[in-house]
Amino acid sequence: MAATVVTVSSGKGGVGKTTTVANIAVALAAQGKTVVCIDSDIGLRNLDVVLGLENRIVYDLVDVVEGRCRLRQAMIRDKRLETLFLIPAAQTRDKSAVSPSDMVRLCDELRPDVDWVLIDSPAGIERGFRNAIAPADKVLVVTNPEISAVRDADRVIGLLEAEGKGPASLIINRVNPALVRRGDMLAVEDVLDLLAIELIGVVPEDENVLIASNKGQPLALDGKSKAGLAFQNIARRLLGEQVPFLEMESTGFLQKLLGRK
Amino acid sequence: MAALLGRKNSADSARERLRLVLIHDRTDLTPAELDVLKDDLIATISRHVDIDPLAVEIRIAQEGRAQRLVADIPLRAGAGRRHK
């Protein structure tokens, strides 16, 4: 095995990075892939609760970097999927406890033994972001169809290009088809036109996302909800499958998308 | 629907505002700085050929994620070289 390291980033906070990492990880593991998620948001860890693994943390990312445990000891195995692992962030330290080269070294140690390493980046474009993108083979940028989120995504995409980590792929999260239809939300093709990078996922706004995080059971564990299905589709696209984008109740974005190509 | 009622969609405003903000973010060039650049350009070109300063258009065009500075500088009818 030779892992692909994928970092999920956004610039702005609260657009759904952690939800995206949790769901793509679950969807990849459900396909039998060995997946390690790394929460690189040191001081503000959350991937553990979204995955429902918060009670099983013994060691964390900083413990590995500072040599208090071996890498394997910090990998928490998921209860439901035995090929899914989490390396949690430290909660009582800050971003400076880890360096970009620490992250590269850690991922290089994982690469021979796993299929996918998914890194949850903190918001912002400072040290935590630099740490998260340093080992990345591919970066997914998450945004919402909202003016500040798109602006921050553009900044991150530009920084990734400058760092030689581009071109990134785009996930547009929390699309509300009714608002788009009414003309009160940017449509998928608007965001794509502005950001001008490849689209890898469109996720509709879905109350099941909140319910899932309440329970610590990522949606993509079962594909019954629309958002869960959208995340499963992103995982399949990462695996190289050609998967059509979900039809968003007559917003017509798919037709326009196909018309563009 | 909203268009029929003569109201501008808020999504249209968002798109237009974002377009302008992103140009500035990507080029780090404010509209005021662009005006200064335009004046300099007009002054320089006017030393060589006869142009109408009011007809000069300068803008930043987008091609994917690349930016291009596009200047449209019409020459005055019969504009000859100013200096030999």
Image: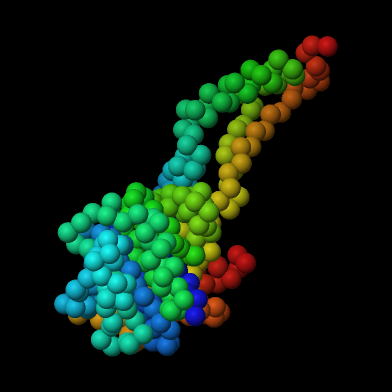
Q: Is residue B40 left or right of residue A217?
A: right
Q: Is residue B2 above or below residue A84?
A: above
Quadrant of the image occupied by residue A140: bottom left
Whether residue A155 can be seen here:
yes
Identified at 71% across, 15% down, the residue is: B47
Q: Count all numbered tags in the image, as a single digit.
A: 0
Work out which residue is located at the far right of the displayed protein and give it: B84
Instruction: Using the image as rendered, state which of residue A212 and residue B78 is in the foreground.
Output: A212
Q: Is residue A149 left or right of residue B50?
A: left
Q: Is residue A41 above or below residue A84?
A: above
Identified at 46% across, 45% down, the residue is: B22
Tell me the quadrant of the picture where the C terminus of chain A can be found. bottom right
Instruction: Using the image as rendered, state which of residue A207 and residue A162 is in the foreground.
Output: A162
Whether residue A209 can be seen here:
no
Instruction: Using the image as rendered, state which of residue A55 and residue A241 is in the foreground.
Output: A55
Residue B18 image point, x, y percent: 43, 48
Residue B45 image point, x, y percent: 69, 21
Residue A85 image point, x, y percent: 32, 78
Identified at 58% across, 48% down, the residue is: B66
Instruction: Using the image as rendered, state which of residue B40 and residue A23 is in the foreground.
Output: A23
Residue B23 image point, x, y percent: 49, 42
Judging from the image, the colouring scheme is: rainbow
Quadrant of the image occupied by residue A90: bottom left
Identified at 64% across, 21% down, the residue is: B42
Quadrant of the image occupied by residue A119: bottom left
